[in-house]
Amino acid sequence: MDALHSFVEFNSLKPIASPLDSLPSVYFHTELLTHTNKSSQHPEYLRQAALEVINNIPIEAIPIYTDVSKNEIGHTCSGGFVKHGRGGASLKRRNADYCSVFRSEMIAIDIDLDFVLEHQLFLEIWILSDSRSVIQYLVNWRDVSDRRGMDIFNNLRTLCNICVLNLQWIPSHVNLKYNDIADSLAKESTTMPQAHVEPLTYLELHSRRKALVNISWRHPTAHSWYRCEGPGAEIRLKEDRIDQTALARLSFGLLKTLSFSRGDKKFNICTTCNMIQATPQNLLDCVVLAYGDLLKRPDFVLEMMKTNDLMDLI
């Protein structure tokens, strides 16, 4: 059990906050000034609604934009941009591989708060995040029980008496300048060395396993038996869905002309030789190909089938 706990993130059985705790001067905003629906409203309308919020931030306040990135091989990163005066500060961090996007956004907010404490930016702070779910989660800070949520709560509890903090949701991918900068910083972090190795949650372990299985399925081993028996050859074929389906039918013998008579397989007569049934092996023999060509040269097999007008039988 101890070995398992070293790979799985700690979650407390009870919240860290007590009934006497409070967070004065900390405000959570899960909406813009007007109600918006990201799935149905036009991006330009969402952009204007977000700019209305951003333009109402006081000039003396410090806005911090956050974003995260996760690439196809499981590298996850958090990025942030602190707009201060005429310049700004870039925040980047490479997270544990296969870390969830939700937890990466939590990490982004946590490193923003660490930056505020480290540089003593005890003014009005606006953290602008495009993850509504994270802000909704932090609204219920009394119920936070995961490690990253505890870190954020401790930072908020430290800062709430010396500055004003606003956590504001903004829509993503609506052409907001500084949000796009934070997004590019997060994407750049995917090439950084992994300096922070943290335990994953149970759901993240499950996602990592699914991703590894998916990669191995799309890139099978070179063993000859697996190449003959395993699925996935059709996916590697860079053709349209009709050609992929035809190759799959030919590989497994499930041709369109297949029927059963008293439990026996029956095929139509081959239109090339007009002598015997058009079984998958006979179709390959008619164009002088072998079964191994289905895996080694699928494009050539399909081309030969089309040239000899055999696609109607597959």
Image: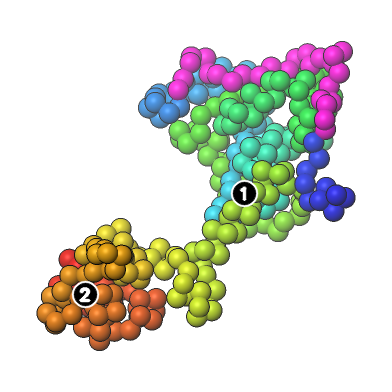
Specify the amino acid type for callout 1. Answer: Ser
Helix, strand or loop under label 1:
helix
Q: In the image, is 146 to the left or to the right of 34?
A: right
- For marks 1 and 2, the one nearer the N-term is 1
User: Is 23 above or below relative to 78?
Assistant: above
Q: Residue at x 54, y 74 (%)?
A: 221
Characterize the magenta stretch by its predominant secondary structure. loop
Helix, strand or loop under label 2:
loop
Determine the CA span between mark 1 and mark 2.
44 Å
Q: Which residues are magenta?
A: 12-37
- Dot 2 surroundings within 10 Å: few (below 14), some, or many (20 or more)? many
Q: Residue at x 24, y 78 (%)?
A: 283
User: Is 159 above or below relative to 172?
Assistant: above
Q: Position of residue 194 (x, y in %)?
A: 72, 56
- The label on residue 207 is 1
Magenta run includes residue 275: no
Label 1 close to label 2 by CB (< 8 Å): no
Quarter containing the C terminus: bottom left
- Dot 1 surroundings within 10 Å: few (below 14), some, or many (20 or more)? some
Specify the amino acid type for callout 2. Answer: Ala
Q: Position of residue 31 (x, y in %)?
A: 55, 19
Q: In the image, is 247 to the left or to the right of 25?
A: left
Q: Position of residue 39 (x, y in %)?
A: 43, 28
User: Is 157 above or below relative to 88?
Assistant: above
Q: Nearer the viewer, residue 13 or 175?
A: 13
Q: Nearer the viewer, residue 44 or 9?
A: 9
**One can see residue 115 in this view:** no
Q: Which residue is mark 2?
A: 278
**One can see residue 110 in this view:** yes
